[in-house]
Amino acid sequence: MKVMILGANGQVGTHLVISCAQTTDLEVLALSSSELDIRSHTDVLNSVKSFQPDVIVNAAAYTQVDKAEVEPDLAHAVNAMAIEFIADAANAIDSVIIHISTDYVFDGKNDLSYKEQDLPNPLNVYGKTKWQGERLLLQKANKPILIRTSWVFSDSKNNFVSAMHSLSKTRKELSIVDDQVGAPTYAGHLADAIVSIANKSITNPKFSFGIYHFNGEPFVSWFEFAKTIFEQSERRGLIQKQPKLWPIASEQYPSLAKRPKKACLQTSQFFKSNNSLSRDWRKGLDLVLSAKEKSKHESD
Ligand SMILES: NC(=O)c1ccc[n+]([C@@H]2O[C@H](COP(=O)([O-])OP(=O)(O)OC[C@H]3O[C@@H](n4cnc5c(N)ncnc54)[C@H](OP(=O)(O)O)[C@@H]3O)[C@@H](O)[C@H]2O)c1
C-alpha cells in the first residue's frame, strides 16, 4: 500500500511517519509544509499524480486556536479551501483520503459525549474553518475518511505538556481552567489508529467511508490533566518542583477564542473493537515523559 502524508512535521504527521515505519508493506511519501503547501491546488494535484498513493493522510492544518481569531483568512485557506484541492487530487487517482478534524466543531453543550452524526456548532474561527473543511471533504471526495480527535499531545514543542513544563520553570503557582472537560489524545495512539483504518479501507471491500471519532480516555479537565503532568514530571526529575495549582473557571482565563466546555467525543466502535489500539492518555503521557527524560540525560 502506498501512503502519502501531508503536514508530516506536525505532531500527528511525525507520529504517522513512525507508525508507518513499524508497519510492513507500506511505501510512504511524507511531505512537510515546506515540501508541499496544501493551499496550492496545482502542487497538490501534481504531487498526488506523481506518487499515485492508495491513501492520502492529511495531517496538515492551521491549529493555532486563538491566533485564528485574527487570521481567519489563513485558517480558512488551510483548513477549508485546501481540503477541496486534496479531495480533487484523491478523486483524480481514485485514492482514499483520510482527513483529521476536531472536537472544537462542537459547542460542548451536550451532556453526553458526541457521536459521529451529531450536528456541529463551532464556537470559534478555528472550529468553523475545520467544519467547513469537513463539509468540503464529505461533499467532494469519493472515498473520504474523516477522523475527529481532541487535545492532541506528543513530545513536540507546541502542546499542553510542553507548555506546562516551560511555565514550571518560571512560575511557583499556576491557575488552570477546570470547567473545560475533554479527552487528551496521544499523537502516537492516533497515528496507529489512522494506519489501521487506512489498511482496512484498502483491504475490506465493504469498508464504510465517512466520519469516525478517536480520542483518548479517560475524560478530564485541563486542571486534572495539568496535575497529572506535574506529578509525573516531578517524579521523573523532569521539573524541579510542581507549581501550586489553582482551579479556575474559563471566564477567569481571558483568551481570544471561546472554547467548548465539554466537547467529549465518543470513540467509534471501529477503533474500540481493535484490541491492538491503545487510547489511555496516561500511557501516552508516560511515553512522552520517557522521551523527554531520555533527551534530558543525553544533553546532561
Ligand atoms: N493539536 C490538537 O490539540 C488537535 C486537537 C484536535 C484535532 N486536531 C487536528 O489534528 C490534525 C493534526 O494536528 P497537530 O496537532 O499535528 O497539528 P500541528 O502539530 O500544528 O501540525 C500541523 C502541521 O500542518 C502544517 N501546515 C500548516 N499549514 C500548512 C500548509 N499550508 N501546507 C502544508 N502543511 C501545513 C504545519 O507546518 P508548519 O509547522 O511548517 O506550519 C504543521 O507541521 C489537524 O487537522 C488538527 O486540526 C489537533
Image (spheres, rainbow, N blue to C red):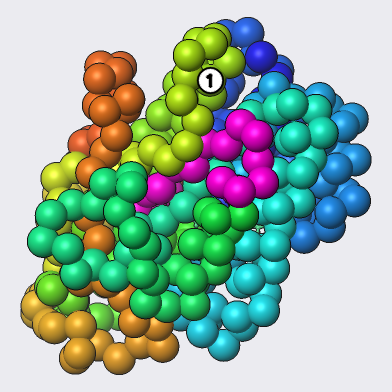
Provide the secondary structure element on which disc 1 rests. helix
Location of ligand 1 given as a quarter of the image: bottom right
33 sits to left or right of 298 = right
From this view, report whether residue 227 is shown above or below residue 138: below
x and y percent of residue 161 in the render?
A: 32, 58
Residue at horizontal 67%, vertical 75%? Answer: 74
Residue at the extreme front of the image, as rendered: 139
The residue shown at (55%, 63%) is 132
Q: Nearer the viewer, residue 8 or 194?
A: 194
The residue where tag 1 is placed is: 201
State the image quarter where residue 93 is shown. top right
Does residue 111 appear to the left or right of 238 in the view shown? left
Instruction: Please give the name of the residue rendered at 14% of the width and 45% of the height, measured from the top-left corner.
Output: 218
- Quadrant in the rendering for residue 51: top right
Numbered range of the magenta stretch? 137-156
Give the x, y percent position of residue 199.
Answer: 53, 17
- Residue at figure coordinates x 25%, y 61% from the top left: 263
Quadrant of image for the N terminus: top right
- Residue 204 located left or right of residue 216: right
Q: Amino acid at mark 1?
A: Ser
- Above or below for 234 versus 98: below
Work out whether 183 lies above or below 24.
below
Q: Measured from the top left, where is residue 271 in percent x and y?
A: 32, 27
Asked if ligand 1 lies within 8 A of label 1, the reply is no
The answer to whether residue 56 is left or right of residue 169 is right
Local packing at callout 1 (Cα closer than 10 Å; few below 14, some 14-19, many 20+) is: many
Residue 26 occupies which quadrant of the picture? Answer: top right
Q: Is residue 84 magenta?
A: no
